[in-house]
Image (spheres, rainbow, N blue to C red):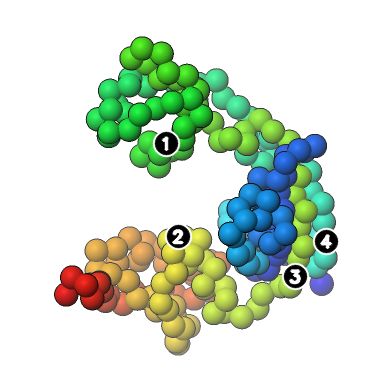
Amino acid sequence: MTLQKKDFIEVEFTGKIKGGEIFDSNIKRDLQKLNPEANPSPIIFSLGEGMFLKGIDDFLIGKEIGDYTIELTPDQAFGPRMAQFVQKVPIKIFRSQNVNPFPGAVFNFDGRIAKVLTVSGGRVIVDFNNPLAGKDVIYDIHIIRKVDDQNEKVKSLIEFLFRRPLNFSIKDNKVIIEVEKQISKFVEMFNEKFKEMIGLDLEVKEIEKEVPKEIQ
């Protein structure tokens, strides 16, 4: 069975720097080298839809279910290192957040991850490049199966788009997602994405946000 664009597949994978260390995996024996407490599981994604690295998508489209070793250049993986992404940040920015920058520290700047390179006087040099930028990487991919179940497809897409699981049901060619009122309009914006990728319309059902019992 040849895999096509938009097919959902379930995979196990390990990514490592060429000639070096593992940086990501969802295989227990490999991920435990990064985090001994990890309890990973296979992932499900749609080919060619930006849910995984484009270089992986491009390689797997047209392939059969099986095992593959894929070598990617920086342009195919995490991009080249960009000198302009190494920037000076006034130390007062850190102090206003009550944090102390030091070389090697990693901070989140409005959704952009940056690593502190040096601290000198009132200036901090930070690197906004992806830590894997400029590196050749290798992925070992085991394709477990093609996913045909609509519930599995919807679950994977929800978790990819919204970074958390949401309650949903499928009825009359619609995905009905339950969300808090404050994010319902945001979720509705993805109607075309659900229609394009899964062939189902999206309906949003507003629910009351649960209040923790200890403060009720």
Quadrant of image for the C terminus = bottom left
Name the secondary structure under disc 4: strand
Q: Residues within 10 Å of mark 4 (few under 14, many from 20)?
A: some
Name the secondary structure under disc 2: loop
Task: Say what amino acid the circle numbered 3 marks.
Answer: Ile
Sequence-first disc among 4 and 2? 4
The residue labelled by disc 2 is 163
Please state the total of marks drawn on the protein image.
4
Q: Give the camera-side residue of 184 and 11.
A: 11
Whether residues under marks 3 and 4 lie with C-beta atoms below 8 angstroms apart, the answer is: no
The residue labelled by disc 3 is 144
Q: Give the camera-side residue of 24 and 112.
A: 24
Q: Residue 26: x and y, percent?
A: 66, 60
* Residue at position x 36%, y 64% in the image: 187
Q: Residues within 10 Å of mark 3 (few under 14, many from 20)?
A: some
Quadrant of image for the N terminus = bottom right
| Gap between marks 1 and 4 measured at Cα | 37 Å
Task: Say what amino acid the circle numbered 1 marks.
Answer: Phe
The residue labelled by disc 4 is 67
The residue labelled by disc 1 is 107
Q: Image height check: is 50 above or below 193?
A: above
* Residue at position x 73%, y 36% in the image: 136
Task: Say what amino acid the circle numbered 4 marks.
Answer: Asp
Sequence-first disc among 1 and 2? 1
Front position among marks 3 and 1: 1
